[in-house]
Amino acid sequence: MEPHVIHYDVEKDLLPLVLSNCQYSLERGHETISQFDLDRIQRQILTRFLQGKPVITRTGIPTLVNTQERDYETVFNTLKGKVPQVLLSSLTRNAVSRALDSYSEVCEALKIVELLLGFLSMTGGDPTMTLVTYLQDTLKMAQNIDRNILHALGRCSLTHCVSLWQLLSSLKSEAMLRLKREPFSGHPAEYQMPLTEDDKIKLKGFISEGNVDQWLLEMHEFLLLVLGRLRATDDYSPSWR
């Protein structure tokens, strides 16, 4: 990394810094109140990311802004045509979930899998090759990945990429909720109405009838990718049951 480049990751670097300078207080009959030490956050950002960096103006520097988000539905379909995909076993899902026990680790693992999805959808690969072998021998980047994340991903092969993305994206949403962040904040408000008590009873009854882990992962994918589209309400009416 060039010494003049300011490099950071929002989920891995900035969010933990902000949360470490947040105090919560709870008053009887009131919601939890969050208080941020903004001065300390500013000082830590200056010290960690900006101190010693030269000031560079944009004059004369060509810039490229890419606002188009990756269409993962298309990526998944393309990938499945080149690398057959199968579901992770429940044993592997549980092991990966236990291994990645922090929000930053989940985010980092998800970024790695999304990188793999991009490469594999273009080049294909051996379905039986482990993710770690592909990262190490093909992409030459295993040495830059946290060992705990490599250990978690080491249980999976290229044939598990889509299923692993489903799992990690779901774990990220769960972690965001624990941090009092909304994973679907960008979705239309019509999709975010609270369930009625009757709906809650029916949903709990459905979930209690059997193993619905994979159904929940696929439903999360649908909520994240499909209902997050522009004009999603034109195709999926919020009033449908």
Image (cartoon, rainbow, N blue to C red):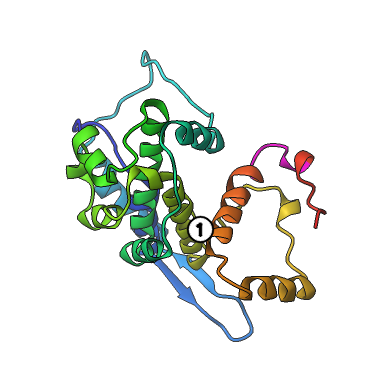
| Quarter of the picture holding the C terminus | bottom right
Q: Position of residue 54 (x, y in %)?
A: 24, 30
Q: Position of residue 74 (x, y in %)?
A: 54, 32
Q: Position of residue 76 (x, y in %)?
A: 50, 37
Question: Who's the residue at 20% across and 40% down the image?
Answer: 136
| Quarter of the picture holding the N terminus | top left
| Magenta stretch bounds | 228-233
92 vs 3, left or right, is: right
- Provide the residue designation for mark 1: 173
Question: Who's the residue at 62% across and 51% down the image?
Answer: 223
Quick one: which residue is furthest to the top in this view? 60
- Please indicate, yes or no, whether residue 39 appears anywhere in the rendered image: no
Q: Is residue 229 magenta?
A: yes
Near-viewer residue (209 or 115): 209
Question: Who's the residue at 40% across and 61% down the image?
Answer: 93
144 vs 157, left or right, is: left
Is the residue 233 above or below the residue 177 in the image?
A: above
- Please indicate, yes or no, whether residue 195 appears anywhere in the rendered image: yes
Question: Who's the residue at 25% across and 52% down the image?
Answer: 150
Quick one: which residue is furthest to the bottom in this view? 28
Q: Position of residue 135 (x, y in %)?
A: 25, 40
